[in-house]
Image (tube, rainbow, N blue to C red):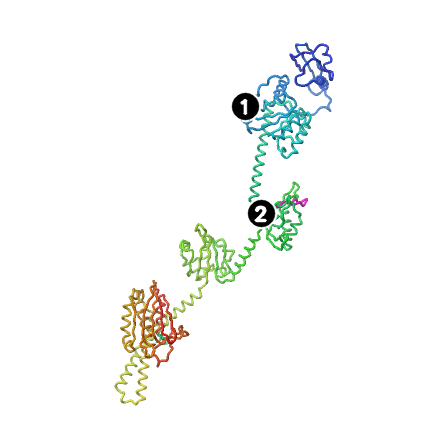
Amino acid sequence: MRLTVADTGVGIPPEELSKIFERFHRVHGTKSRTHEGTGIGLALVQELARLHGGKVWVSSEVGKGSTFEVEFPLGVAHLPPEKIRAATFPKLGSEAFVEEAQRLVGEEIAEPALPSAETCAYSYPSGARILLVDDNRDMRDYVKRLLGRFWQVECAADGVEAWALVQKDPPDLVLTDMMLPNLDGFKLLSKLRRDPDTRSIPVIVLSARADEDARIEGLKAGADDYLTKPFSARMLLARVHATLQIAQLREESERSLRESEDRLNLALNVAGMGTWDWDVSTGRTIWSDRHFRIFGYEPTEDGAVPLAWWLHSIHPEDWERVQRGLDEAKRSRTVYAPQYRIRRNGTNEIAWVATQGRFIYDDAGNAVRMVGVLWDVTEAKQSREKLDECARLLDLSSDAILMGDGEGRVLYWNEGAEKLYGWTDEEARGRLVPELLSTKGLPSRETLAASGRWEGEVVHTTRSGEKVTVMSRWVLLKDVSGRPYRSLEINSNITERKHAEEALKEHAEELARFAYVASHDLKEPARMVACYGQLLERRYRDKLDNKGVAYLDFIVDAAQRMHALINDVLAYSRVTSSSDKYVPVDVNELLHEVLANLKVARDECGGTVRWSNLPMVMAERSQLLQVFQNLISNALKYRKPDVPPEITIEADGGLSPVFTVRDNGIGIDPQYHERIFGLFQRLHARDEYSGTGIGLSICKRIVERHGGQLWLDSKLGHGTSFHFTLRPS
Ligand code: ADP
């Protein structure tokens, strides 16, 4: 192959031609444009040509130009085999060489024609500043012109100048030659990498050395990219652009990493969480500030903590569990998440902590590091304990106690509920109550939600199909927006009581029926005894001696009492069997009727009865009449000797008024206030005051049937006030 390089330059004088290929020979009187000649170049060309089995010639004419010719054989056959190895030179297009050559001869290089997409892309990152370091002025001018189309370019001619510029205002990228006067590229690079302010500035190395070792050396020294001279303009632009872009991305990702780290720290702080990082091989452990404080220590400067601080803090009883958890997590590669007690440094205070951590393994599968978070759960533990205590207390109750969420799903179900309904707490939890029990008598959820609480009887069908009657008390808790979020329910089993009540009611009704029938049937014979007794007394009195007359009086008196008794028992039994309806009753008018009925008794003792403006009430008229009649006739009867009875009837102005019947009679000792309402209970002998001891029992029964109450105020010798209310539904 023959390579001919002809120029139109200054030419070489004929006397120099023969020496032109000698080492250090320089032709005098000619000007070198870029390199101050060393006299080595052509000697090198000749040497290289020889090494490749070739030759060199020159012909020249002063003032016209020179022609150099190199010739060498192609292929490798003529070369020593030990010198041959695979090519490591980058494949460069002719473009780079042409540009380099153009530059060397000082020819204006056409701006590289870039596809428009590329042109646009290079303007990013906009405003980036590049520091170009090269001792070759031509090179500097050329590169500056090239890069200056897109970015700001500053130039330095050596390493010292470059370092001064970097310190003044760090650029976004440094583009440096390796061979530099004063401070070479390697030293500049290592200075940049050592200083924390400049460590991250990307550096592209430009070098004439194209071999692999040089490239590795440059990258090892911390260069981000390595560009071999000669390079094409497009290649340089592309590399600079790519490096700037990578730096930009790196900065962005570092920033977002920093931000997410800040956010994580904030979240951990807010959550009261500490972090720990344990180097398994060296034992070096780092805690966050919060971790130190949870353990009762002041944070150390760098967060490093002697392992003993941790070990000594762990409660001895929990130590084995913690150790086992670590072993297990390491073996199974799972999360280590125990809760254990610690004694806070310098105090006797025991705290509970929860932690979660994970081992990190190397490629060989050895656990090398472990990281995790830790937080204080003392309060949660204490309230959990309190809750457990409450739950145990609730379990002591034989009532069924249930707690549900807003939808009625069971959250808590005590032992009482387990016993009553047959479902265990575990089975009931999370299920809706209607899935477990069918319920009769409970108002709708909407009604319950509106009132927030309810109390009443409910019939549940239990797991075994048994029906139980419970007295249910029910409270609904609502959140600030008024939505129910908890329901609390206590159900007392009243099934047996209900059965007993029903049986009692049945008995009572039977008894009342019997009393009615019996007294009704007894009335007639009693009346006959009284009638015929009186007849006998009238007709045959003079035929009897004194004793006979007295006996006859006894018979008549007994028959009359018997008659009265039967009447009272009948009245008493009628109270339950009556089927009268509640009607509006004018009490004033009712009292006129009572007074008419009691005219004889009033006239006998000169008693007065007073009232004014009594209200209308809803009542069974005949029964209310009986209440007033019994109370007023007692007031007339139990009068003080020689003091005419004065009776007042009043009602307070309430919606369901309290009626009072007050007298000025003998009064009742408080110890008998309860007793006098019992059947056949009397405080006096028959010869003192007549009576059957049924009157007040009848009154009480009537009042209670009207939903009211009957009671009294009285002291012996100071008159009596009977009060009663009526609340007919
Ligand atoms: P009795 O037929 O004996 O009057 P009651 O049931 O009406 O039966 O009354 C029970 C007892 O209460 C009476 O025997 C009497 O001792 C006492 N008692 C009732 N009303 C009065 C009153 N207004 N003053 C004093 N004692 C009274």
Quickly name the residue at label 1. Answer: 115
- The part of the image, by quadrant, that contains residue 661 is bottom left
Which region shows up in magenta? 272-285
Residue 718: in sight, yes or no? yes
Q: Quadrant of the C terminus?
A: bottom left
Labels 2, 1: front one: 2
Q: Confirm whether the magenta stretch covers residue 274.
A: yes
Q: Is residue 710 left or right of residue 491?
A: left
Residue 522: in sight, yes or no? no
- The part of the image, by quadrant, that contains residue 169 is top right
Residue that protrudes farthest toward the left in the picture: 539
Q: Crowding at label 2, few (<14), some or many (≥20) Cα neighbours within 10 Å?
A: many
Residue 170 — which label?
Answer: none
Observer-nearest of 44 and 611? 611
Quickly name the residue at label 2. Answer: 273
Q: Does residue 626 lie above or below 218 as drawn?
A: below
Question: Could you say where residue 414 lies in the image, as x and y percent from the top left?
Answer: 50, 59
Q: Confirm whether the magenta stretch covers residue 53.
A: no
Q: Crowding at label 1, few (<14), some or many (≥20) Cα neighbours within 10 Å?
A: few
Which residue is pictured at 69% across the width and 15% down the height?
Answer: 70
Q: Quadrant of the N terminus?
A: top right
Q: CA distance from mark 2 to mark 1?
A: 55 Å
Question: Could you say where residue 37 lies in the image, as x and y percent from the top left?
Answer: 70, 18
- Ligand 1 sits in which quadrant? bottom left
Disc 2 marks which amino acid? Met
Disc 1 marks which amino acid? Pro
Question: Could you say where residue 457 lies in the image, as x and y percent from the top left?
Answer: 42, 61
Q: Does residue 484 lie above or below 619 as drawn?
A: above
SS class of the residue under badge 1? Answer: loop
